[in-house]
Image (tube, helix red, strand yellow):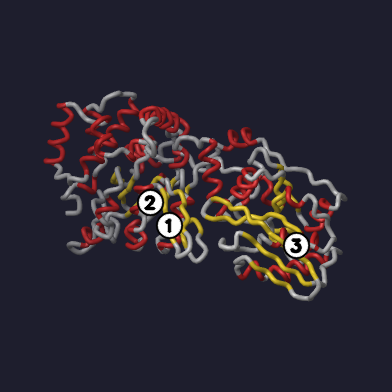
């Protein structure tokens, strides 16, 4: 008997419908075709054990299974469930008349328990787009898939429940979530808040400007000055997720298997902080079976690189194109996949190997030339993509011991959100531009051109402070954001003056 049912293959952050055909006939062989990988081929032993342990009958016949399209590689153990149900249906143990209405995915353990899978959300979206009635998947992934409207999601714990459902012996209850309520409740829940940060008002202001304009930031300061502490609080001042951003970000984390199984949707912006020993593949994504890297997991959120000069130069250089294009393309001989990479880069570093260059109290013990050599580990092209460079000095005791509460993240976030609304209106007719940091030279001349007084101030600053040529555009971008925070239509000299103050590393005498 020949039966057809449906599974799915995830490529990039999208899923493709896989048609599974199972035929039972006379003989004793088991054949699986259609470009399955090793884990799919090994499903035979898991399926046999799961079926027999649960009192069902595994057919002692020749079984031929075809998975199409045959040119798409089928990876992972999540095909166990549809293969097992297809075998039961082809052998007559389960009716086949309703199989075509449902998509099934899930790994089987030897006792028939259905284990969690990766990519439940993109698979559910694909099932809905193909007009299927329902998606049968592990109970642990049911809430994640249930955010997709127009598709019934059935979470199951054991293959016995699936067989009983198709035999009409048991009804499965669809999983439902109140998407709007869960989304709104979780948007303001943050572990870290800027009210915990004592002092460092100038740095907090710089981070507010960065959040308002989507600017990348590098913080240079001595050990213990609060660089990591403030970076961890950046998601709390970024504009709240929109529902579209939340769905897109959840899809990426779902494909990577990084979602919280207790929640249906990511409601706060991601914060990724990889160690400096990370490889370039782990950073940008890829591998034999491509997976999203750290830059994609940070999409719509923050990528924090602590101790920036300690990262491999190759790792830092492969980030240059994603910083510009907001996506990464992983190419292989037979296919290529695109992963979104629209992240905000926050980097932190010591000013020198010993950590105390420019410290107000402690003496730097680095030999001559060591500071410049240390800074040269960061290439000019990468530094060119970082708009704000701010130096941090240690917080004095009076500030640390001050019991007066600092400004809360919610207050800062309110100002940031208003500035982003201004930019959203400004760039509504410009495709691919969402914030000031993405403006090109033509847009800078249109939206951020200073008046005559401001131009003289900028010229004098560049000459007096020995600012490099790359600082010019960056200052204009940041000054436009500062003007938006002030609600000003035009860039004023005061906005330029503040933006100039955020270009520490561009000063040619900084490392002397």
The tag earlier along the polypeptide, 1 or 3, is 3
From the viewer's side, name the closer residue of 183 and 311: 183
Real-space CA distance between mark 2 and mark 1, rounded to the nearest whole angstrom: 8 Å
The quarter holding residue 182 reads top right
Q: Name the spot of residue 444 as percent of width and height, x first.
A: 26, 34
Q: Name the spot of residue 194 as percent of width and height, x first.
A: 44, 38
Q: Which residue is mark 3?
A: 84
Tell me the residue at 24%/54% (across/down).
Answer: 380
How many marks are shown on the rendered structure? 3
Give the answer, above or below, for where 247 lies relative to 295. Answer: above
Q: Is residue 440 left or right of residue 453?
A: right
Residue 322 circle label: 2
From the viewer's side, name the closer residue of 431 and 436: 431
Q: Which residue is mark 1?
A: 284
Query: Is disc 1 placed on a helix, strand or loop?
Result: helix
Tell me the residue at 60%/34% (across/down).
Answer: 185
Tell me the residue at 82%/69% (across/down).
Answer: 59
Select label 3 or label 2 by which is in front. Answer: 3
Give the answer, above or below, for where 59 lies relative to 273. Answer: below
Q: Name the spot of residue 269 as percent of width and height, x first.
A: 49, 42
Q: Is residue 226 visible?
A: no
Real-space CA distance between mark 1 and mark 3, rounded to the nearest whole angstrom: 36 Å
Query: Is disc 2 placed on a helix, strand or loop?
Result: helix
Query: Is disc 3 placed on a helix, strand or loop?
Result: helix
From the viewer's side, name the closer residue of 301 and 374: 301
Query: Which of the image's four quarters has the C terminus?
Result: bottom left
Mark 3 nearby-residue class (10 Å; few <14, some 14–19, many ≥20)? many
Tell me the residue at 65%/63% (across/down).
Answer: 77
Q: Decide: marks 2, 1 in contact (CB < 8 A)?
A: yes
The tag earlier along the polypeptide, 2 or 1, is 1
Q: Is residue 436 left or right of residue 195?
A: left
Q: Name the spot of residue 165 as percent of width and height, x first.
A: 82, 51
């Amino acid at each position: 008997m020949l039966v057809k049912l449906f599974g799915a293959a995830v490529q990039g952050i999208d899923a493709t419908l896989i048609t599974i055909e199972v035929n039972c006939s006379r003989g004793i062989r088991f054949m699986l075709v259609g470009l399955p990988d090793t884990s799919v081929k090994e499903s035979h032993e898991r399926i046999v054990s799961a079926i027999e342990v649960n009192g069902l009958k595994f057919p002692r016949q020749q079984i031929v299974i075809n998975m199409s399209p045959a040119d798409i590689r089928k990876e992972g153990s999540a095909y166990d469930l549809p293969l097992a149900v297809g075998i039961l249906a082809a052998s007559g143990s389960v009716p086949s008349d309703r199989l075509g209405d449902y998509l099934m995915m899930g790994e089987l353990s030897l006792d028939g328990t259905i284990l969690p899978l990766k990519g439940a959300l993109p698979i559910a979206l694909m099932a809905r787009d193909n007009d299927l009635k329902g998606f049968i998947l592990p109970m642990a992934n049911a809430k994640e898939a249930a955010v997709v409207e127009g598709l019934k999601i059935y979470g199951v714990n054991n293959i016995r429940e699936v067989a009983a459902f198709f035999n009409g012996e048991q009804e499965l209850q669809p999983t439902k979530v109140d998407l709007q309520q869960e989304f709104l409740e979780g948007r303001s829940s943050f572990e870290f808040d800027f009210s915990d940060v004592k002092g460092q008002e100038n740095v907090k202001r710089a981070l507010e400007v960065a959040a308002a304009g989507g600017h990348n930031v590098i913080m240079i300061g001595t050990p213990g000055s609060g660089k990591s502490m403030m970076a961890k609080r950046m998601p709390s001042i970024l504009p709240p997720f929109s529902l579209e951003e939340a769905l897109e970000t959840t899809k990426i984390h779902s494909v990577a298997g990084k979602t919280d199984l207790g929640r249906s949707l990511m409601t706060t912006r991601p914060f990724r902080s990889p160690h400096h020993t990370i490889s370039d593949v782990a950073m940008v994504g890829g591998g034999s079976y491509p997976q999203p890297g750290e830059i994609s997991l940070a999409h719509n959120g923050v990528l924090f690189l602590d101790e920036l000069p300690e990262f491999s130069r190759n790792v830092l250089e492969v980030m240059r194109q994603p910083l510009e294009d907001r996506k990464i393309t992983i190419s292989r001989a037979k296919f290529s996949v695109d992963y979104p990479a629209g992240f905000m880069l926050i980097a932190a570093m010591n000013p020198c190997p010993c950590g105390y260059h420019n410290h107000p109290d402690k003496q730097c013990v680095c030999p001559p030339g060591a500071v410049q050599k240390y800074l040269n580990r960061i290439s000019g092209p990468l530094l060119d993509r970082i708009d704000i460079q701010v130096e941090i000095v240690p917080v004095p005791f009076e500030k640390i011991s001050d019991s007066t509460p600092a400004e809360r993240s919610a207050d800062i976030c309110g100002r940031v959100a208003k500035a982003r609304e201004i930019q959203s209106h400004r760039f509504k007719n410009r495709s691919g531009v969402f914030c000031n940091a993405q403006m090109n030279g033509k847009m800078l001349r249109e939206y951020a051109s200073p008046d005559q007084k401001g131009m003289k101030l900028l010229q004098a600053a560049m000459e007096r402070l020995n600012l490099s040529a790359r600082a010019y555009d960056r200052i204009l971008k940041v000054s436009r954001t500062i003007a938006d925070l002030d609600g000003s239509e035009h860039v004023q000299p005061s906005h330029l003056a503040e933006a100039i103050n955020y270009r520490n590393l561009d000063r040619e005498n900084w490392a002397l």
